[in-house]
Amino acid sequence: MSGYAGDRTTGFASPAADSAEGPIDLSAVLDLYRPNRYPVRVVGDALSARGILHGDVLIVDTAASPRTGSVVIARWQDQTIVCEITRNRDGWFLRSGRSGDGHVLRPVDGDQDAGIWAVVCALVRTEV
């Protein structure tokens, strides 16, 4: 018995067959071959207002420099958190996404066990 080659069909041929793309390599699309890129799964819904939901997979870059408005993975008082980072005249601050906490600003200060581990550069949603 022979396998299906794709070139022998019956009926109407798809007009899109000429523009069909081959398999998509997510590792290449997300640039996961770089040694500083990691997938991280989100636990919680603190940034749902930014479209980041519980169970999503964030692609983070530990070598990227944060900018105001970036979503980052940070350490804050022995916790690992996903939050937005912002800068004002007083320095860098972590802003939570929860509406109930008034978007609390937490200073990024090495003396207070706070720091940025990685910047989020992509999001993968496994369920829709």
Image (spheres, grey):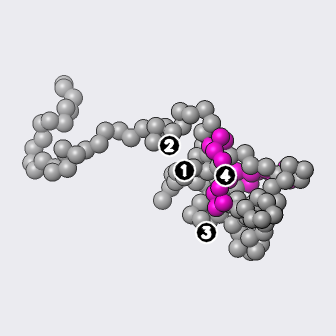
Secondary structure of residue under mark 3: helix
Secondary structure of residue under mark 2: loop
| Residue tagged 3 | 49
| Residue tagged 2 | 30
| Residue tagged 4 | 66
| Vertical comparison of 24 with 55: above or below | above
Q: Quadrant of the N terminus?
A: top left
Whole-percent x and y of residue 85? 70, 59
* Real-space Cα separation, disc 1 to disc 4, in angstroms: 14 Å
Name the outermost residue toward the left.
Answer: 11
Q: Earlier in the sequence, mark 1 or mark 3?
A: 3
Nearer the viewer's eye, disc 1 or disc 4?
A: 4
Q: Earlier in the sequence, mark 1 or mark 4?
A: 4
**Do callouts 2 and 1 mark residues in contact (Cβ within 8 Å)?**
yes
Q: Left or right: where does residue 110 sit relative to residue 96? A: right
Picture quadrant of residue 63: top right
| Residue type of the residue flagged with mark 2 | Leu
* Real-space Cα separation, disc 1 to disc 3, in angstroms: 16 Å
Magenta highlight on residue 4: no
* Real-space Cα separation, disc 2 to disc 1, in angstroms: 7 Å
The answer to whether one can see residue 23 in this image is: yes
Name the outermost residue toward the front.
Answer: 89
Give neighbour class at mark 1: few <14, some 14-19, many 20+ (Cα, 10 Å): few
**Do callouts 2 and 3 mark residues in contact (Cβ within 8 Å)?**
no
Q: Which range of residues does the magenta coloring cover?
A: 61-81
Secondary structure of residue under mark 1: strand
Nearer the viewer's eye, disc 4 or disc 2?
A: 4
* Real-space Cα separation, disc 4 to disc 2, in angstroms: 18 Å
| Residue tagged 1 | 122
Q: Left or right: where does residue 11 sit relative to residue 127? A: left
| Residue type of the residue flagged with mark 1 | Ala
